[in-house]
Image (cartoon, rainbow, N blue to C red):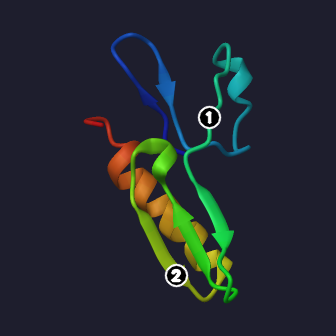
């Protein structure tokens, strides 16, 4: 689990339960994307909550979820974001 700590002391991460984030301080959790099936049963990743693109379609939900994480780590979680 990657934690980005800004100069102002804010922590940003992709939520996971690897550690109890409440021990760091008050939490503000917001949605980074939507992973939903389309009409044909394929999976679409909508990253509009973080001003990102739509990715897919993916045949498997697991592939869509991995794509979501990869994009967030590269474009949203990086220290320069």
Q: Are the residues tagged 1 and 2 within 8 Å (C-beta)? A: no
Tell me: residue 73, above or below residue 44. Answer: above
Q: Which residue ends up furthest to the left in the rendered image?
A: 80
Question: Which class describes the residues within 10 Å of circle 2: few (<14), some (14-19), or many (20+)?
Answer: some
- What residue sits right under mark 2 in the picture? 57
Q: Which residue does the image show at 65% across and 30% down from the upper left?
A: 29
Which x, y percent locates residue 78?
33, 42
Which x, y percent locates residue 3?
49, 35
Which one is closest to the eye, mark 1 or mark 2? 2
Using the rendered view, name the quadrant where residue 61 is placed.
bottom right
Q: Which residue does the image show at 48% across and 54% down from the upper left?
A: 47
Q: Helix, strand, or loop for circle 1? A: loop
Q: Which mark is residue 71?
A: none
Q: Helix, strand, or loop for circle 2? A: strand
Question: Which class describes the residues within 10 Å of circle 1: few (<14), some (14-19), or many (20+)?
Answer: few
Which x, y percent locates residue 26?
68, 14
Q: Distance from label 1 to label 2 (Cα)?
A: 24 Å
Q: Which residue does the image show at 70% across and 36% down from the upper left?
A: 19
Q: Which residue does the image show at 44% across and 62% down from the upper left?
A: 70
Left or right: residue 69 compared with residue 37:
left
Tell me: residue 9, above or below residue 43. Answer: above
Which x, y percent locates residue 37?
68, 75
Tell me: residue 47, above or below residue 32. Answer: below
Quadrant location, the C terminus: top left
Q: Which mark is residue 30?
A: 1
- Nearest to the observer: residue 68 or residue 43: 43
Tell me: residue 66, above or below residue 31. Answer: below
Circle nearer the N terminus (1, 2) = 1
Left or right: residue 43 compared with residue 79:
right
Instruction: Count the marks.
Output: 2
Q: Which residue ends up furthest to the front in the rendered image?
A: 39
């Amino acid at each position: 689990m990657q934690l980005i700590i800004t100069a102002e002391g804010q922590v940003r991460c992709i939520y996971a339960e690897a550690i109890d984030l409440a021990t760091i301080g008050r939490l503000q959790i917001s949605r980074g994307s939507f992973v939903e099936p389309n009409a044909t049963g394929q999976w679409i990743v909508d990253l509009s909550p973080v001003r990102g693109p739509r990715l897919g379609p993916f045949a498997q939900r697991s592939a869509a979820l991995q794509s979501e994480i990869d994009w967030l780590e590269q474009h949203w979680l990086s220290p320069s974001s």
